Amino acid sequence: MTKAIALSGLRKSFGRTTALDGLDLTVETGEVHGFLGPNGAGKSTTIRVLLGLLRADGGTARLLGKDPWNDAVELHRRLAYVPGDVELWPNLTGGEAIDLLARLHGNHDRRRRDELVERFDLDPAKKGRAYSKGNRQKVAIVAALASDAELLLLDEPTAGLDPLMEVVFQDVVLQAKRQGRTILLSSHILAQVEKLGDRVSIIRRGRVVQSGTLGELRHLTRTTIEAETQRPVTDLADLPGVHGVRTDGNRVHFAVDGARLDAAVQRLGAAGLRSLVSHPPTLEELMLRHYGDELAANGHRGTGDERDGGAPR
Amino acid sequence: MTATTAASAGTAAGRPRPPGGVLAGTGALLRFDLRRDRLRLPAWVLGLGLLTLSTANSLHTVYPTAADRASIARASDSPAVLALTGPAHYLGDYTYGAMLGHRMLGLMTVLAGLMSILIITRHTRAEEESGRAELVRSTAVGRHAQLTAALATAAVANLALALLLAAGLPALGVPGITAGGALLYGAAHAAAGLLFAAVAAVAVQFTAHTRTASGLALAVLGAAYALRAAGDAGGNGLSWASPVGWLQRTYVFVDDRWWPLPPVLALAATTGAAAFALSTRRDVGAGLRATRPGPPVGSPALGTALGFPLRLHRGLLGGFAVALVLLGAMYGSLLGGADSMLKDVEQLRDALARLGGHSLADSFAAMTMLVVAVVGAVYAVLATLRPRAEEAAGRAEPVLATGLSRTRWLGGHLTVALLGSTALMLATGLGFGLAGAVSTGDGGAFLRLTGAALAFAPAQWVTVGFAAAVYGWLPRAAPLAWLVPAYAFVIGYLGPLLKLPDALNRLSPFGQVPRLPAAGMDWTPLAALTLVAAALLALGLAGFKRRDLELT
C-alpha cells in the first residue's frame, strides 16, 4: 500500500534561517500520526510543503503517491487542511466561509456540515471579524471535516478551543479515523496526541528526532513508581536502570527504565507490597528527554532533575 | 535628614506623574506612531515638497519671458484647464508665483489631504481592526489617546511639509515667489492636511473596516475637489462649497490673502471635536453601526473561481463606480458652457482647433477624460493588489489548500480587476456622455464620449498587468504598482505646463491612448496596449505559480 506521506531529507530555508534540515517522515495510510514539536520546530513549514504552498529546497516529498508541488490541485481535492491560525474574511459570515472552502474543495456533505456546526456549537450567521480565535478555528475544522477528504492535515487545530470543544474534536477525529482516513495531527499538546495518535514523530529544529508507536517510544523512557511495602526496601538503588530512589520509612519513590521494570517490581514484592502506584511515561517526559537541555538552559530544572533521578548534585 | 526629605519630596514632585484621564499616554503613543512611520512620513513630505520645489524651479526656464507667461495665461483661460487647476483670478498677472498657486495649490492640498487620511486610518481603525489597539488600550492609556496621537502625527507631517515649502520656495530665488507668499502657501497645505485628517478621524468612527473608512474620507476629499473644479470651470459660486476652493482663494503670490485659512482651521477643529464625541458612542473595535448577522450559508456563486473574488471586490468596485459616474457627469455637464465661454477667446480656439475635433467641447472632453481615466487606474491597482492583501493576511492559505489552483485563484482576482476597470470606464463614459449630450444639446456626443472613455480600457489592462507582474514575482515590492497611475498623473498634469517631451508621456500607457473625441480613432496603439497587458498578465501568473506563498 502506498504511504500517505513519505518525506525524506526535506530541506527548506528562509534566507539565513533553516526551517527544515533534512526532515524524514513517514505516515501510513489510515493512521493518526502525531507530529510533535515545540514552537518553531518546523511543523507548519513541513505541512505547507506538503500542501505545495512552499517549495522545498531539497529532499523528496510524496503525498498520496504524488508530488505535492506539481500535483497540488489534484492532491488538494483529496485532502483537507486546518491551519493553526485561521484568518477569516471580515465581511463574510462563518457559514459562508465554510461553504466557500467546502465548494472550492470540490466535494462536501451538506448534512454533515450542519451536524458539525451543531456539534461545535458554532453560530454560522456571524461575520468573520466577530468570531473569537476558538470560533475561527471551528470554522476551519468544520470545513475540513465536512469534506470527504482521505487525508486530513491538521496544524495545531485546537489552539483556542475550550476543553469541551476539545472533547468534541477528539470525537470527530476518531470518527474520521474509523472511516479509514489518514490524519497528520501536528501539536504541542501532548495529551491530545496521546489520546488520538497511533504513531508519533517528534520534530526538533527541522528534523525528526524520533518516530514510532507510542509503545515503542515508551521503551525509551522511564516509568515512575510509588509503593508502600511492609518492610523498607533497601537494595533498590543497586539495580541497574533504577533512578532517583527516595525512601521515607516504608514508602519508596523511584523511576525505572522500561526494560528493567520486572526486576524492580520483584524487589518490591519481596518486601511485601501493600500499595503500588505507577505512572506510565507521558509524552511530556518523552519530549523532555529531547528538549531537556533547552529547558535546563532556560533555568527550569525541577522536572528534569526528577526525571534524572533527583539526586542532589 | 533635611536633605533626605528634600530628595524624596523632589522625587515625588520632580518626576511628573503621567497625566491621568482620557489623554493619558498620548505622548508615548505619538512617539510610537512617529517611530512606526519613520520612513513613510519623510517619504511623503519630501516627495510632495520636492515635487513643488522642482516645478517652481523649472517654471523659470520653461517660461523665461513675460510674453511666454502671458501666452500660457491666455491658453489657460479655458474651462478644461481651470477645472484641472484653479480659479481664473490667478491669470491676471501670471508671475511664477501665480503659476505655482494656480497650478499646484489645488492638487497639492488634495495630496496633503490624502497623506493625512492614510495616516489617520493607519493609526486608528487599522489598529483596531487588527486587534492591536485592544492590547494598547489595556495599558494605562486614556480613551482618546490613540486618536489624539494619530491626529498629532498627521499634524507633525503637515507642519513639516508647510515648513519645507515656506523655507524652500524663497530659497530658490524665483522672481514672484516671495517669502510671505511661501509662508501662506505652506500654511494652506497644512490647513488642508489638518482638515482631512479630521475628516478621516470622523470616518473611522463610522465603520469597523479600514478600507471602508478610507473610502469614506477619500469620497469627501474627491467631492471637495470636484466641487471646486465645477465651480472654477463654470465661473460660478460652487467653489465656495469646497474647502479646497477656499484655500485656492487665498490667491497666494497674487493677493496673499490670509483670511480663508481661519475658516478652514475652524472647520477642521469642529470636525475633529465631532470625531472625539462620536468615538465615545461606540465600542473599541466596533463601528457606530452595529454589524448585522449575515447569511448562515454561502450562496452557490460564492464557491466559484469568479464569484468569490467578485464578492470580495464588490464594495471597492461599487464605490469607484459611483465616484466615476459622478465625476464624469460633472465634467460632462460643463461641456455646454465650454463652447459658449470659449467663443471669444480667439487664440485658444486656434490652439484647440490644431488639436482637431468636432468642437471646442470635444477638446475639453479629451483633456478631462485623462483625469477620469487615472482615477480608474487607482481602482485597477487597488483591485489587482487585493490578492496581495489576502496573502499577507493569511486568508489565501486555506483557499489555496483546496481544489482551487493558484492560477485560477489569482486569475479570478485579475479577471475581476480587468472587467471591473473596463466597466468603470464604461460607466464613466455613460455619465460623461449623458451629461455632455444634455448640456450641449448634441445627441451624438453621447456615443462619442462613451467611446472616448472606453478607449482607455486597454491602458487600464496594462495597469492591471503591471501590478500583477510585480505581485507575481516580487510580492513585497507590490506597492511599485502605484508607479503607473502616479506617473500617468504627474506627466499628464505637469507635462503640458513644463513642456516635457512627448516621449515621456508616451512611456505611460495612458499617453498612448488616442485623445478621443478631439483626435481621431487609432486602433494600433490600443491593440499594442492589449498585447502588452496580456504579456504582463501571463508573466504575473507564471511568477505566482512558481514562488513560495508568503506565510506568517
Image (cartoon, rainbow, N blue to C red):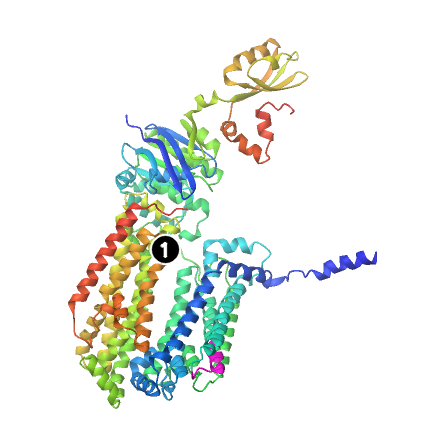
Q: Is residue B248 left or right of residue B309?
A: right
Placement of the N terminus of chain B among the 4 image quadrants: bottom right
**Quarter of the rendering containing residue A296:** top right
Q: Can residue B267 be seen in the rendering of this structure?
A: no
Q: Residue B183 in magenta?
A: yes
**Residue assigned mark 1:** B477
Mark 1 residue element: helix
Q: Chain of mark 1?
A: B
Instruction: State the image coordinates of residue A19 (x, y, percent, origin top left).
Output: 42, 39
Question: Which residue extends farthest bottom?
Answer: B344
Q: Amino acid at mark 1?
A: Ala
Residue found at x 50% / y 71%? B159
Looking at the image, is B464 positioned above or below residue B172? Answer: above
Q: Is residue B8 left or right of residue B148?
A: right
Q: Can residue B269 be seen in the rendering of this structure?
A: yes
Q: Which residues are magenta?
A: B175-186
Principal SS element in the magenta part? helix
Instruction: State the image coordinates of residue B511 (x, y, percent, origin top left).
Output: 25, 69
